[in-house]
Amino acid sequence: MQPEAPVIVIGAVNVDLSGTPNAALHRGDSNPGRVAVSMGGVGRNIAENLCRLGRRVSLVTLTGDDHYGQLIREQCRTIGIGMELSMTEPAGRTSVYLCVNETNGDLHTAVADMEIYERLTPERLEGILPVLDGAALVIVDANIPEETVCWCARKIRAPLAADPVSVAKVGRLKGMLGRLEMIKPNVPEAEALSGIPIREDGDLPRAADALHGMGVKRVYISLGERGVWADDGHERAMLPCHPGIIRNTTGCGDAFLAAAADAWLDGADLTESARRALTAAAWCAADEHAVSPTLTKTILLDR
């Protein structure tokens, strides 16, 4: 692994439409509040966070040949995310994520139009395999099809990390677990992957051990407002969240994984990596954007 090698992220980009009400939500009614339009998607968010932390990053994704696709590409290039490996599907719609938040920024409900990613098949990635092999780290998000996830595990020789995305999609990663340097599930996702019910804190190391037995090296189980269970099979600890203002929780997990990956690339140990990741997540939560435009490596290390 060469220090100058890029991080490559394979995953989703979305146009994010988010609404946050001024007062408690009323079902079946119009709720006064704020509506924001931004670029998002798990893969794109991870890539932007890494870029803001000073990493050279390329994104492998699929967009439609439409206005939203053009907006995403232009915004990614402006930030510094390499788009040379990304593809366009003329017959597809660029992915859109529509969410409604609670007044405190927590997610209330969402609709994701992400059908286009079913077309991100192994055949599309075959031609860029030599580039993927040369990455410092390849991060895969579970929005891509299971067959493509399994192809990544079998074919890519670079180190791998993964984001489960959701309980509905986490099963797509099972064929990749034996290759992963790190994974960041929440409790329901960790249960689905490990087969271990997590009813109390004592179940966390058991679930992590099950994942280690499948080949995962670093496990970060998100506990929401309680923090994270960090576990590499030798070192393990529960670390609390950083206190602070919460304006938005969309993208906090993406910031966490990006900072954990950046720390791993720096050679940081498990606890230091988790502390950096929690700091990045807190910085994201205090911002209205899915990725804080003010995040830098200096801020991360200072805090």
Image (tube, rainbow, N blue to C red):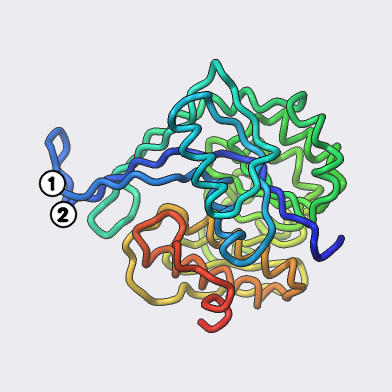
Please name the residue shown 60% across and 45% down the image. 164
Pointer 1 residue = 32
Name the amino acid type tagged 2.
Answer: Asn
Disc 1/disc 2 C-alpha distance (Å): 6 Å
Please name the residue shown 72% across and 54% down the image. 7
- Pick whichever, 20 or 75, lies toward us: 75
- Pick whichever, 209 or 87, lies toward us: 87
Residue 101 place in picture, x, y as percent: 29, 49
Name the image quarter holding residue 88. Answer: top right
Height in image: 86 above or below 190?
above
* Residue 22 badge: 2
Residue 223 place in picture, x, y as percent: 49, 62
Name the amino acid type tagged 1.
Answer: Pro
Is the residue under label 2 in contact with that under label 1 (CB below 8 Å)?
A: yes
Residue 129 place in picture, x, y as percent: 83, 37
- Residue 187 visible from this viewpoint: no
Please name the residue shown 34% across and 49% down the image. 107
